Amino acid sequence: MYDAPWGGSEVLWAQTAAYALAAGHAVFVSTHAWPVPAAPLTALKAAGASFYFRPRYEPTLQFRVASLLRRLPGAGQLPEIVALRRFAPDVVVVSQGGWNDLLFHQQLADWLKVAPFLLICHNYHDPVRQDDGQRARMIALFGRAKELLMISDQQLRVLRRQLAVPLPNARVVQNPLNLPSVVPVPYPVLAAGGVPQLSVVGSFDVDRKGQDVLLEALAAPEWLARSWHLNLYGNGPDRAYLERLIALLGLQQRVTMHGHVASSAAIWANTHLLLVPSRIESGPMVGQEALLCGRPVLTADVGLVRNWVQEGETGFIADTASVVALTQALNRAWDCRADWSAMGLAGATRAAVQLIKDPALDFLNHILAAR
């Protein structure tokens, strides 16, 4: 990723790199430079990984012009390409926070012709604006990859439609999850007349995570007449905006912004229903985690949702991340809130069957087979 030092899209490659180092392989990592490296990067460096930190994007004209000039044909090799050549890898993994990131890194895309590589797509947009030239470049790049890794069946279907190609080398993988040592987590007692605790767990990035539209739905008179409390867990660039929106909607007594909470068990101990109002999501991983921990999930229809959530049985699915669709799903959930605990147990049972025990180890085996 380029917009945050760490996130869900970084976990798979980082855990796989750790396994590779433990198995005696040499590992080179190129990622963006942040003032304070994320803890998993520090751990990889301590374990023996080599690093090249790329300059992080800055929204200044000077930076953008200089970055563009460095990437023009004939401008010379980028420092990260020089570092890659020096390392001379047997196989390369490119982890994209999105799906077409390499469109903007042509020199790296060209360099990938010298080594077998696997390409991860952690997100998708639907609709997406692209011309035939961009499609042709992505089709060629995807076709050269030993494996093209997606996070959900829906993501793969959308990209096949958008590119109008079958993508025969694509497969769907699972991301490692952040789970307590024991799952499911006991469901918090909700006595008659008690206040249901609703939770959103995710970056404060409303373009993707949709907390803004959820707050608008919950500010409607019908919901203000009900007893509930919303917990927002996370950090991100839109924290101040969300605080202003909460005040504008008069929800200060109904919503608590907790920031980042390291203990996932503590989150689930204070959650009766997880809400995922995401506009853009190939996961969401937190939905999988909630189900495995025994919590029903109300979610917009994104990514892997329909593979993991069964409407009315383990959760509730809104057609889109809109006020109307979320309100309809919230009303369905509220009408059967007495069943949330049982739905959570059913979700934990179903999700456990789908869970890959160790996605990072499985990924490492595929990487080694691609050499």
Image (cartoon, rainbow, N blue to C red):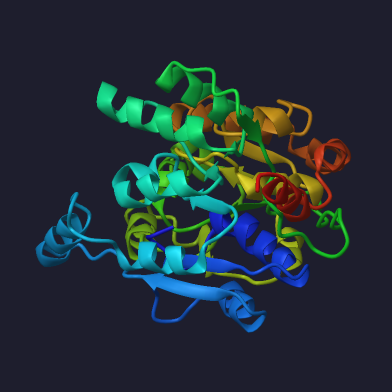
Is 206 displayed left or right of 352 in the figure? Answer: left
Q: Looking at the image, which residue is at 73% across and 59% down? A: 268
Is 129 displayed left or right of 20 in the figure? Answer: left
In percent of width and height, residue 118 lies at 57, 44
Q: Looking at the image, which residue is at 62% across and 34% down? A: 152
Is 178 displayed left or right of 317 in the figure? Answer: right
In percent of width and height, residue 263 lies at 70, 70
Relative to residue 64, is residue 51 depicted above or below? below
Instruction: Count every numbered label the image shows and give the total.
Output: 0
Q: In this rendering, does residue 231 appear at all?
A: no
In percent of width and height, residue 348 lies at 84, 43
Is 297 displayed left or right of 283 in the figure? Answer: right
Please tell me which residue lies in front, 367 or 216: 367
Please tell me which residue lies in front, 135 or 82: 82
Q: Looking at the image, which residue is at 52% across and 63% down? A: 234
Q: In this rendering, does residue 258 appear at all?
A: yes
Q: Looking at the image, which residue is at 48% across and 26% down? A: 159
Relative to residue 272, is residue 304 depicted above or below? above
In percent of width and height, residue 11 lies at 62, 59
User: On the image, which quarter does residue 302 sit in?
Assistant: top right
Q: Quadrant of the N terminus?
A: bottom left
Relative to residue 321, is residue 248 depicted above or below? below
